[in-house]
Image (cartoon, rainbow, N blue to C red):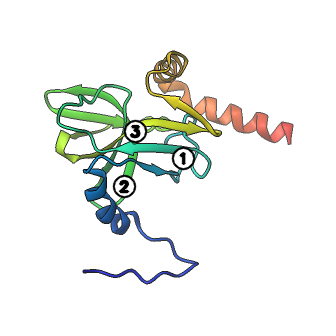
Amino acid sequence: MEFVNYNENEKIPAAVWFRAILPIMREGYQLKICPAGRSMRPFLRGGRDEAVLSVPGSGRQLKKNDIVLYSIETGIYVLHRICRINRDGIYTMGDGNRNIEGPLQREEILAVTEYIIRKGKKISNDDPKYKFLVNLWRILRPFRPAIFRGYSVLKQIRN
């Protein structure tokens, strides 16, 4: 058994706590996390929004636009959206990124987002407005850097 020494100034690495939580999630429990980082902007803002995750059951089909959690070789856990599934595997991309990652195999997917909580409001993956915005954002992929720059300039002007 491994013990983690808690210090107020240190965060417990995801690799440590997720090893403990995953078996509990396999029993049917959900996990609410507050993601860090910027890769899922604008739909999930790190430090503000939350994602409610569950372990995908054997009967649940993963589909395009699902937000999934997986681990990469460095031990970092990544929460990104599925952008393509084919016979090679599952390809993902952060909403704030332009690069597609993959292929991942189904067994590499640790959890799938059941819904998100954005600005305190619960948003289902099946919400028509949410699906429309996600698909529109995918079409705007080549223009994302310019959109983010323009938003940043407008924010600076407003402040």
- The span from disc 1 to disc 3 (Cα, nearest Å) is 17 Å
Instruction: Report x, y in % for residue 144.
Output: 55, 30
Mark 1 in CB contact with mark 3 (< 8 angstroms): no
User: The C terminus is located in which quarter?
Assistant: top right
Judge from the rendering whether residue 69 lies leftward or rightward of residue 41; answer left or right: left
Q: Which residue is mark 2?
A: 77
> Please, what is the three-letter code of the amino acid marked with disc 2?
Tyr
- Mark 1 falls on what kind of element? loop
Task: Identify whether 25 is placed above or below 140.
Answer: below
Q: Nearer the viewer, residue 158 or 25?
A: 25
Residue at 37% over, 66% down: 17
Q: Quadrant of residue 19?
A: bottom left
**What label sits on residue 113 in the rendered view?**
3
Residue at 36% over, 59% down: 76
- Mark 2 falls on what kind of element? strand
- The span from disc 3 to disc 2 (Cα, nearest Å) is 14 Å
* Disc with the residue nearer the chain's start (1 vs 2): 1
Q: Which residue is mark 1?
A: 38
Q: Quadrant of residue 49?
A: top right
- Mark 3 falls on what kind of element? strand
Mark 3 vs mark 2, foreground winner is 3
**10 Å crowding of disc 1: few (<14), some (14-19), many (20+):** some
> Please, what is the three-letter code of the amino acid marked with disc 1?
Arg
Instruction: Report x, y in % for residue 137.
Output: 51, 23
